[in-house]
């Protein structure tokens, strides 16, 4: 088995496949781009207009180099090294880089469409909630896509307000600002 040097001792059972969660690194960018493309293309289509997705997906499916280098962005991978989930948290507000004392943000979550409902996304989110809390961050906020609102609600996030996440000057994605206070 080819194990990435930063694989954590964190393993989850997902269906019949053993999946590891580890910190992401810049060399994960190509595989993450492929995962984000597969996930967002399939999972966002029911809630977003096709024309908007055709403009938004090329922007949303690029792995963010700052996230890959931050140490709080994670990937879930199978024993053979296939990435099946990703997500993380930062103290920086997405898109602005601004900091608010004690506040953290959930960032760029995705699960492979064939693995939705197997616990991978939930385990990644639980990991992020625990790690951010241990680092002293509360509350935890996220910009949820319309289709992921239920996923975040199951983990204690509550909707605050609808928002439009600007991707470029002329492309914005409708989303929901959500917040989770205490563990």
Image (tube, grey):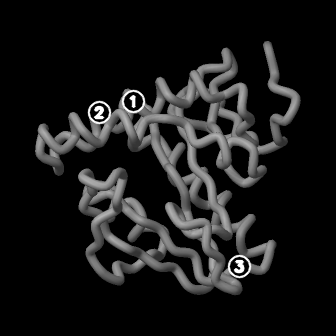
- Distance between the alpha carbons at the discs numbered 1 and 3: 30 Å
- Identify the residue shown where x is 39% and y is 40%: 59
Q: Is residue 84 above or below residue 128?
A: above
Asked whether the beta carbons under mark 2 and mark 3 sit within 8 Å of each other, the answer is no
**Can residue 47 be seen here?**
yes
- Identify the residue shown where x is 78% and y is 80%: 136
- Distance between the alpha carbons at the discs numbered 2 and 3: 32 Å
Q: Disc 3 marks which residue?
A: 137
Residue 32 found in image quarter = top right
Dot 2 crowding, Cα within 10 Å, few <14, some 14–19, many 20+: some
N-terminal label among 2 and 3: 2
Q: What element carries label 3?
A: loop
Residue 153 found in image quarter = bottom left
- Quadrant in which the C terminus is drawn: bottom right
Q: What element carries label 1?
A: helix
Q: What element carries label 2?
A: helix
51 or 6: which is nearer to us? Answer: 51
Q: Is residue 72 found left or right of 42 in the rendered image? A: right
Asked whether the beta carbons under mark 1 and mark 2 sit within 8 Å of each other, the answer is yes
55 or 179: which is nearer to us? Answer: 55
N-terminal label among 1 and 3: 1
The percent position of residue 8, horizontal first and vertical second, equals 82, 41
Q: Disc 1 marks which residue?
A: 37
Dot 3 crowding, Cα within 10 Å, few <14, some 14–19, many 20+: many
Q: Disc 2 marks which residue?
A: 41
Q: Is residue 135 found left or right of 111 in the rendered image? A: right
């Amino acid at each position: 088995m080819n194990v990435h040097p930063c694989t954590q001792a964190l393993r989850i059972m997902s269906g019949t496949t053993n999946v590891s969660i580890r910190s992401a690194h810049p060399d994960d960018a190509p595989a993450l781009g492929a995962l984000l493309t597969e996930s967002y293309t399939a999972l966002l289509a029911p809630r977003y207009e096709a024309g908007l997705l055709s403009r938004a997906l090329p922007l949303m499916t690029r792995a963010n180099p700052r996230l890959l280098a931050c140490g709080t962005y994670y990937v879930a991978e199978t024993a053979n090294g296939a990435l099946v989930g990703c997500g993380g948290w930062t103290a920086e507000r997405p898109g602005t880089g601004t900091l608010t004392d004690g506040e953290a943000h959930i960032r760029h979550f995705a699960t492979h469409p064939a693995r939705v409902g197997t616990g991978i996304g939930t385990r990644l989110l639980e990991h992020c909630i625990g790690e951010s809390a241990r680092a002293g961050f509360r509350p935890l906020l996220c910009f949820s896509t319309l289709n992921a609102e239920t996923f975040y609600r199951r983990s204690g996030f509550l909707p605050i307000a609808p928002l439009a996440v600007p991707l470029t000057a002329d492309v914005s994605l409708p989303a929901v600002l959500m917040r989770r206070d205490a563990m």
